[in-house]
Image: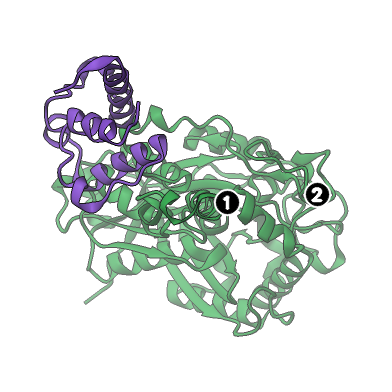
Chain colours: A green, B purple
Amino acid sequence: MPHKRVVITGLGVVAPNGIGIDSFWSALEKGKSGTKRIKAFDVSGYRCQVGGEITDFDPSAYIDPKKLDRMDRYAQLGVVAGKMALTDAAVDVQGIDPAPGVYLGSGLGGMLCYERNFEALKNRGPRAVHPNAVSSSMPNSVAGQMAMELGLKGPNITISTACSSSSHAIGHAFNAIRFGQSKMILTGGAEASLSPLTFAAFDAMRVMATDSNENPEQACKPFDLNRSGLVLSEGAAMVVLEEYNSAVARGVHLYGEVLGYGANSGGYHIVAPDPTGQDVVLVMKSTLQDAGLQATDIQYISAHATATQANDRVEALALKSTFGAHAEKLAISCVKSMLGHTVGAAGVFGVLASLLAIHKGVIHPTINFSVPDPECNLDVTPNIARRREIQTAMINAFGFGSNNACLIIRGVKND
Amino acid sequence: MIEGPHKSTLAGDVKAVIAGYVKKPVTEIKMDQPIREQLGVDSFGMFELTFEFQEKYKVEIPEEDLKKLLTGDDIVNWLALKGKQ
């Protein structure tokens, strides 16, 4: 049986530099940073004091306040982004058979709730732990809340693979539709990582930028010679994936088509990338094969580019190895330069950045770029957006635990 | 039967906690009617609501008593018996 085509028909986003797709795309186009000095908790004792905090998010504008107490912040972000995506897709999910499901990526789950209850346990004993501690902090809490809030009664699956979580979620949703198991899936990622313990844990790993506490918008510098580490962020983004014929029959707008998905492991180190980059080369090649494309078919790369010295060096090396001479023709940019690192939501943010390029012909810039790194000598679209009509994009996402995910999407004609 | 100034204050406080939990004005809380049916609170919600009272009044509500606390008045009477105001 031939595979089904899978298209993207709805987008939703709550990001540190924009809420709603128009606001988010506009921010990307302008190179607007969302990283700032953290206000959510006292950061004075931390080495890094900068994060991608969303300061203008009011969940009660979207969700019945009665339900908010049972949701960690990451679930609130996810439910709101999901609601936006379904609204954008203009769909009544009750009319879709089989019932649409949720494939969700989150690297950390409800850590704010977890930390609050751990503090209660430590300070006041076991009976101070709230009855909803489990249901609010578990990694699949957001997927469950989305199903209840949005009436999505199909498969409800959470993938937790650190920073690649949402790319794997989208990849598996893509497979479920192309192999005929589902007709529509709401997929993406949600993360609320700006909590005292989580932030301290990343700080302790010495992977975060500590040189920009006074210039928080300039903290994340992917591919720059002086890049100094990642900037931890919160956010959620969702896409509606839909079987092509079903979407066309509904007459809904098509943002793009998912063509390929690849996954593998470096089997190398729990947090460090293999310096040879061979696992990254393999995952990109397997994704090209899955999509039935040649390397020269790719025009744009939304790089993982965390802005750590190791990640960006390895990713650049792998891109040059995979694409050969074509690497010089690729437009590349990194959304983390503006957003920071949304951990489990990072992959889907790359998808949204790629759709900006495909849909509007705008390659967003990699901001905070000033000194080229000879080892990352690729066109990373420094500082200023560029107009370029592209059709096909690759999105990279690599996660702690030595795992990689890669997606390929392309433009699709709207009749 | 609720009597006396302390119970009256206690009843007001209990009503306020219930109202805060269900995010409704206190005027909509009928203390003599079952909380679950009246306010659409599920069984898990009753555990959450009980937790609110345990936290506020620093008491432990045992399992056997938990099942008997159906209305706002039940909660007021139980707390009054424990000497809470």
Horizontal side of residue A314 vs B10, given as left or right: right
* Closer-to-camera residue (A150/A179): A150
Q: How far from the left and from the top, in percent, is residue A307? A: 74, 58
Residue occupied by mark 2: A369
Vertical comparison of A140 with B78: above or below: below
Give the SS element for disc 2.
loop
Please give the chain letter of the residue carrying mark 1: A
- Quadrant of the frame with the N terminus of chain A: bottom left
Q: CA distance from mark 2 to mark 1?
A: 25 Å
Q: Nearer the viewer, residue A62 or A194?
A: A194
Q: Residue at x 69, y 68 (%)?
A: A327
Q: Are marks 2 and 1 in contact (CB under 8 Å)?
A: no
Classify B6 as above or below A365: above
Query: In the picture provided, is A88 more to the left or to the right than A372?
Result: left
Residue B82 in the image, given as x and y percentages of width and height = 30, 36
A221 is higher (above) or lower (below) than B50: below
Q: Is residue A233 left or right of residue A407?
A: right
Residue A193 image label: 1
User: Is label 1 in a helix, a strand or a loop?
Assistant: loop
Host chain of mark 2? A
**How many residues crowd mark 2 within 10 Å: few (<14), some (14–19), many (20+)?**
many
Q: Which mark is residue A172?
A: none
- Tell me the residue at 68%/60% (across/down): A202
Are the numbered discs 2 and 1 placed on the same chain, yes or no?
yes
Residue A317 in view (yes/no): yes
Q: Nearer the viewer, mark 2 or mark 1?
A: 1
Which residue is found at the position 39% from the left and 44% from the top?
A71
Query: In the rendered structure, which amino acid carries the disc numbered 2?
Result: Phe
Which badge, 2 or 1, comes first in the chain's sequence?
A: 1
